[in-house]
Image (spheres, helix red, strand yellow):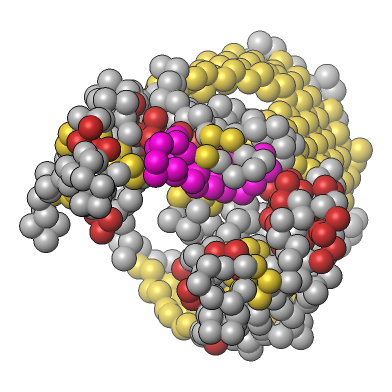
Amino acid sequence: MLADYEVIGHNYGVNGIYSNQLSDRHALTLTGSYQAQHLHTISNDSPFNGQIVTNLIDASGNCYSPSTGGYASCFSGDGHNVYSQGGVNGASLTPPVLAVDPVTGAATGAASSGARWLVTENGQHSGALDAVTPYISAVSLSDAYRPSRRLTINAGARLENFTFRLAETGGPYPARPFWYAAYNRENCFSPGAYATTSATLDPATGAWTCPTGSAHVALSGSSPKTSSYTIFEPRFGFTYSFTPDTVVRGSYGRYSAPPSSSDQLQGASQQNLASYIGQFVPFGYTTPHHDVHPATSDSFDFSLEQHVPKTDYAFSVTPFLRTTRDQIQATPIGAGGVVAGFNTGRQTSSGVELLIRKDDFARDGVSFNLSYAYTRSRIRFGNLPVGYNYVDTVDSAIQQYNSFTRACASANAALCGTYGAKNALPAFPSAGGPAVTNPYFNNAPQPLFDRNADYVPYTPLSTLSNGFRSTEVPHVATFVLNYKHGRASVTPSLTYSSGASYGAPFSTVGFDPTTCPPGATGAVTPASCSGFVFVPNTYTHRFDGFGDFKDPSRLTVNLQTSYQFSTRVRLTLTGTSLIDRCYQRGYAWDNGTTCQYAQLPLNLLSATSNATGGPVQLAYPYGSWYNNFWNGTVGQKIPTAVFGTLDVKL
C-alpha cells in the first residue's frame, strides 16, 4: 500500500524587463525576477502510523521492558512490550511493569531506577514533512551588439540567488531529544558502509556496544534557520554570416540548477525524527539540514548552417560540450521510497547534432527532415560530506562479500576492508545446533571499482533494488517525410534509438550466513536469515558495472495524414506505433516485448542468488522498467493507436 502523499503549494512572484535600443548597433536588456514558493508536503508513512506511543524510561533516558523489568531497546515493537501503541487492538498505554524478579526476588531494573511511562509520540501526525520555503531572485543584463551587417554579438551576465527558509525541527517537538539520544546509543556506523548497524545491549549494565571497526552515530537536531546560495552566470554568443547561404553560430553560458526544497531539510512530523534522518548517515549527514548547493554548468556549442545554393536542401552541424560541477543526483534511500538529492561530483556531456532539411512542409511536393544526435555523458564522483564518495560505498559492499571468501583469511585490507578475516570461515559455529555452512567460502573474490574513474550517469543513483539504468542514450535519429498535393498531405515518421545502458552492482542479494539459525545438518533456509549481503550476478558471475548492458535498439514508425476541406475545416488522422520493434541483445533475461530494462518492479525487489534460492519471479536481476516517474516512459512496447481530429474554425 502506498503512503498518503499530499502537496500544498502557493507560488508568488514578479518579473520585470527593461529594454533600450541605444543605437542601431546596441540593444540593452535588463531583467529582474523574484519568486516565493510556499510549499507543504507530507507523506503519511511513519513507523508509528500516527498512534500514541509510550516508553518505559528512567531519568537517564534508558528504556525498559515492562514484561521483564530489564533494559531494552527504545525502538522495539509492542510485541516485545517495550513501548505501547494506544488504540492498537485496545492496547494499554501503561501496561503493568514487573517490579520483582521472580527468580532472585530482587527489584527489577525498571523498579529500582524509578522508570515510568512517558508519552513519546502524541499520535497527531506521522510521516515525512517538507515545509521549506524557497525564495528565488535574479537580475540579468545583456547587450545585443552588431558591429557589422554580418556579425552579431550577444554578451551579458545573470546573478541568481536561491534562499531557503528552513522549518523548525526542535521547539514544537519536546520528545525529540529523547529519540536522538536513544538512536545514537543503539546505532553504529563504520566508514564506507552503506547502512548503519545495531549496537549490542548488555542486559546487566544497559551499555550498548558497537561492532569492531564502527562507532556510535552522533545525530543532532540542530539546523540553521536559512541557507542561501548566490551564483554568477556569464553568457556570450555570436552569429556570423559569411554569405546568405552560410552562417556560423557559437555560444557559451553558465547555468545553475537549484536543489529541491526537500533536499535542504529532511523533516518529519513525528517526534521520532532520529529514525528518519538516520538513513542519511552513510552519506555524511547527521542533522536534518543538508548543505546541497546548486549545480552549475558551463555550456559550449558551435554550429555551421549551410544552404546548398540553387537547391532546396540545407543542413546544420552542431557540436556541444557541457561540464557540470556539483551535479545533483537523486538517490533512493532504503526501500521505503525516500529519494534525496546529493551533490555527487562533476559530469561532462558532449556530442554532436546533425540536421538535413529538404524544402518546406507547407509547399506541394516531397520534403523531409533528417536529424541525428550523438551524446556521451560521464560522471566522476567527488567526496560526500562524510569524506568518501559514492564508489567507496559500492566497494564496501563488495568487500563485505569478499570477506566471506577464503581469500580474506589473510585479512587483506584492500580486498576485505574493515571486515578483515572474521567472516573467512567455511562454517559459522552456532549454539544448540550444527555450524552454519558459508556458501561463499570457495568463491573467487571480486575486484573493486575505481573511485576516480568516469562512469555512465544514472538517475536515480543506483542503490538497493533501485536506480539500475542510465540517462544516456548515445544514438538517436529521426526521419520525417512529407508529401503534399493540394489540400492533402501524408507524413510518415521514423525514430531510431540505440537504447540506454543499464546494470548495477547491487542487482543480486544473498543471505548473510552469520545471521542464520542452524538447520538440521548445517544447511540453511534463506528465509530464516535476518541479514543479507550483495553478491555477484548469478549469470555474469561478477558485480555488474554501471552501463554493462544495453537496452534493445528500437525502431518506431508513425503516420499522419490530413485533408484541408476548406479554410475553416481540416481533418487529421494519426497512427502511432504502427511499427514498434525492439531488437534484443541476447541476455538471459531478454523478453520480446520489453524495450527498456532496469531494476525489478516496485523498486523493492532484488534478484536472489543460486545459493539463496527464492521464487522464480526473482530469478533474473533485471526486468521491464516500470518506474515512469523520471521521464514519463515505460519499458514495454507501445501498442498501435489510431485517432482522428476534426478542426473547425468559427
Horizontal and vertical percent for residue 470? 68, 59
Q: Quadrant of residue 374?
A: bottom right
Q: Is residue 296 left or right of residue 170?
A: right
Identify which residue is drawn at 47% across, 39% down: 208
* Residue 203, placed above or below residue 230: below
Residue 627 seen in render: no
Q: Is residue 31 left or right of residue 496?
A: left
Q: Nearer the viewer, residue 19 or 555?
A: 555
Q: How many numbered tags mark residues here?
A: 0
Residue 385 seen in render: yes
Q: Is residue 419 left or right of residue 565?
A: right
Quarter of the image containing the N terminus?
bottom left
* Residue 583, placed above or below residue 382: below
* Residue 41, placed above or below residue 578: above
Q: Quadrant of residue 117?
A: top left
Magenta range is 185-208
Q: In the orientation shown, which residue stands out farthest toward the top? A: 22
* Residue 524, placed above or below residue 459: below
> Residue 539 colored magenta?
no
Identify which residue is drawn at 56% across, 27% down: 291
> Residue 198 colored magenta?
yes
Q: Nearer the viewer, residue 93 or 370?
A: 93
Q: In the orientation shown, which residue stands out farthest toward the front? A: 104
Q: Nearer the viewer, residue 141 or 482?
A: 141
Horizontal and vertical percent for residue 474? 78, 62
Identify which residue is drawn at 40% across, 74% down: 645
Quarter of the image containing the C terminus?
bottom left
Horizontal and vertical percent for residue 90? 8, 57
Q: Quadrant of residue 362?
A: bottom right
Horizontal and vertical percent for residue 295? 64, 33
Identify which residue is drawn at 57% across, 68% down: 430
